[in-house]
Amino acid sequence: MANLSNINNVLRVSSNLRVGINTDAASYALEIGGTNSGIKLKNSGGSGKVYSILSDTSGNFQIYDDAAASGRLVINSAGNTTFAGTVTGSEFYGGGLGLTDVNATYLKVDTAVSSTGLTGERYLSKSVYQTSGITGFLIRTNIASNNYAMWYAKIQLEEFNYNTTQVIEVSGTALSSGGFATKSAVSYTPITIKAFNYDNKVYFWVPALHTYTDCNVFVKTGRGYVGSTGAYNRVDSITASAIPSTGVTNSVDIVASTLNPGDNFWSANGNDIYNSNSGNVTVSGDLSVGGANKARFKSDGTNTYVDAIPANSEIRFRVAGAVEKFRIAASGATTQTMDSTTSLSHLWSQGVPLQNVWYTVYTYSQYDSVCFFAMVSFENDAGDGANQSAMFATSAGPAYGAAFGVQQISGGTGIEARRSSTSFQVRQTIGGYTSSTRLNVRFVSIN
């Protein structure tokens, strides 16, 4: 028979059938006292292990893996729970608030999570779909307007049934006194976002680019001040609506710098610049290209260029990458170059030509063979009889680019022509007219 003479020193069963171990008065059906209060579960079969369920001296409740010497689940005295491995589940309630990863990696959510999982969308972005009008999207965060906060927002706009997207990244620092110390943004195309305080919260507003647009938003705070390592979504709500008409304070405009959008992009003001991924770009309004540098429009299929040259305000048309075929000067004069191996008719014109000033009609290369006829006319729109014309041709003798002669065949004496270096030039000597005049050349080169 077992010796039970000392059992009541460690195990007591009260009259109400409560069992106490290392305690005189059990408050529950089973109560374990002492400095090492726990239950050890041993399974010696198969891959069984030894686990302990215990309350440690630091005030933590643990499910403890004895072999690994590690607490697999720990609940501390503040109620915070730490899992040593991956938490797997089909649904998480409470909006995901407080779910963090001590290893600073990721909260792992199964791709099969239903729409009811992670309620509150704190770990997912929020979105709204605008179906009528072109207003904008009002974004309310849970960032208090009287707290410092380092915030970062990613906003994506997507139009229904189009291969177009607009991505905006915005960041800044909110002040405890309200308003914002810093702010900046980048986007695919120019756009202005508004940040402001309203209803004691930080708000954002982004303009809608088209009807039937989805706006998807995620706003997080940095680790500093009110941020956390979890960086959950700070968006409380998002609506397709205008900025409130009253109650808004500390409103600032955040003008986004532009990124390279790739193949698809919008502008901030609707269809001013639009590409539907068809290869065609439609531009309404003025298009400014190049700045102080040459602006070049190129056709890859034909290797043809149109150059706007800011230094002398000319427009030049080129083929084969470099060969100039046509030029429009700032004065309005036009020059059409010629292929020296064929016969080519060419019209050159200079508006309001100055008296006794030579104008270059065509420039040959040094060794080009030269043979041409040129009819030159001076026209005065006033119709006062000052109009003159003359015919010129290459003269006898050397006939190549660097050494050809020019002779007048017929016409008035108020028009002259010559060779200068390798260029054919003309001028008018009539004078007395400062407007409504033109000097025209019909030029035929035969080579």
Image (cartoon, rainbow, N blue to C red):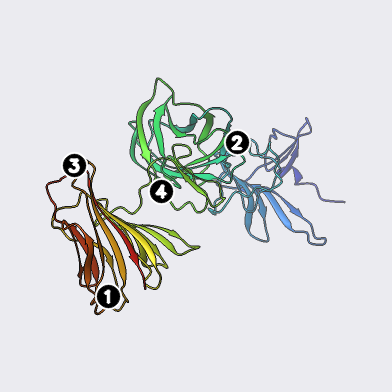
Who is closer to the viewer here, 196 or 9? 196
Residue found at x 63% / y 39%: 118
At numbered mark 2, what does the secondary structure look like: helix, strand or loop? loop
Q: Earlier in the sequence, mark 3 or mark 1?
A: 3
Mark 2 crowdedness (10 Å alpha carbons): few <14, some 14-19, many ≥20 = some
- Whole-angstrom CA distance, mark 4 to mark 2, is 35 Å
Q: Which residue position is annotated with label 2? A: 95
Q: Dot 3 lies on which element?
A: loop
Q: What SS does tag 4 mark?
A: strand
Say above or below: 270 vs 312: above
Alpha carbons under labels 3 and 2: distance apart = 89 Å
Residue of label 4? 258
Q: Nearer the viewer, residue 17 or 109?
A: 109
Q: Residues within 10 Å of mark 1 (few under 14, many from 20)?
A: many
**Disc 4 and disc 3: Cα gap in Å?**
58 Å
- Amino acid, disc 4: Thr
Q: What residue is disc 1 on?
A: 401
